[in-house]
Image: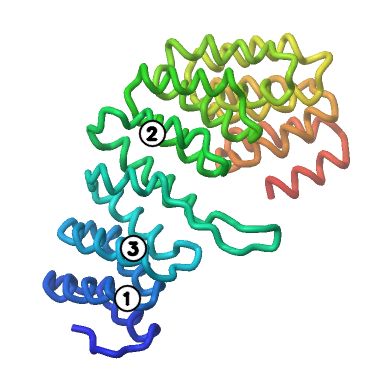
Amino acid sequence: MPKRNQNTEEQLADLNQLYSLDDEQVITQTIEQALHSKSCRVIAKAAKICEEKLLYQMEDELIASYQRLLKQKDPNCLAKSAIMRALVVQDCHDVDFYLAGLRYVQNEPGWGGPTDSAVDIRCSSAMGLVSTTYPRAMVELLTLLNDPEPNARMGAARAIKYGLRYEATLVFKQKLFCGDEEPEVLGECMSGLLTVDPDYSLPFIATYLDSTDDLLFELAALALGDSRLDEALEALQAAWGHTFAIHAERRRALFKAIALHRSDDALDWLLGKLEDADAGLLETGIEVLAVYKHRQALKDRMEDIVAGSGNRRHHALYREYWG
């Protein structure tokens, strides 16, 4: 049991000792006291331990600590964010708590003006709410998907993936039609569609491979590649034939997307394209495929391709990326 009137470092030291303890009573008492600390660092650490040890019995204490923090200083929402994450991991189903978190904003002074430090709270609240049986969860997430903060919109898109299939599909498609100033949000929506309803959504996402907008083309290609669906690989290979001769940047984007597929068929296909590739494409291949250098057969084949190029720059790049 920790002593009273400890400083922050002493309280953190006591909390760290809990990782090696099995005494549930001591752990619970120490966490409970830490959640009443005046130090946000201590509260955040206590919440992290609750998350890691799955201390379900601490749910009420975590919520109470969060409510207290709303009335005191918590710079950058350090403690409140940690508590919210812990409750989501512990499958807390308090709908009202999550609804309040979705609407929470904490503006703090910054060089370019006030900065909202509560984005992580809203994102975690979204993930928590979608895991409940709340019937209007998707309505609330739609609001967050149009949040002023890009990272909040990203968090909404990630949470929507876990919603009901048809509702999620509707929300994602509507967002793609309306657009977003942050490309990553649109990419997350594309990935979301391929996650919640792949059979229906793949042909729709593939239409962006015919888009005149280079950014939408790349986002769609990357989403298709990352989906690892067989039909996605086929769509990307077909697009390669349409763009190879006239769009160097799109060719590079497609190469990266097909590499994301990670299947043997995809990687073998890319290596085949490198065997008679121009200098630019081979440089792309050396860089992009280096993440697979642990695959000895692939590494041997790439080494042969580079050796056959007779290009010093290619040899130097190979040594840099492949070792």
Q: Quadrant of residue 133?
A: top left
Identify which residue, 72 or 137, lies in the foreground: 72
Q: Quadrant of residue 82?
A: bottom left
Give the crowd class for mark 1: few <14, some 14-19, many >=20 residues within 10 Å.
some
Q: Whole-percent x and y of residue 236?
A: 62, 16
**Left or right of residue 9: residue 268:** right
Say what amino acid the circle numbered 2 marks.
Answer: Glu
Badge number at residue 16:
1
Residue annotated with mark 3: 48
Q: Quadrant of residue 95?
A: top left
Query: Mark 3 falls on what kind of element?
Result: helix
**Left or right of residue 223: residue 110:** right
Of marks 3 and 1, the one in the foreground: 3
Badge number at residue 140:
2
Q: Residue at x 43, y 45 (%)?
A: 123
Q: Whole-percent x and y of residue 16?
A: 32, 76
First of labels 3, 1 by sequence position: 1
Give the crowd class for mark 2: few <14, some 14-19, many >=20 residues within 10 Å.
some
Say what amino acid the circle numbered 3 marks.
Answer: Lys
Q: Whole-percent x and y of residue 28?
A: 17, 70
Query: Mark 2 falls on what kind of element?
Result: helix
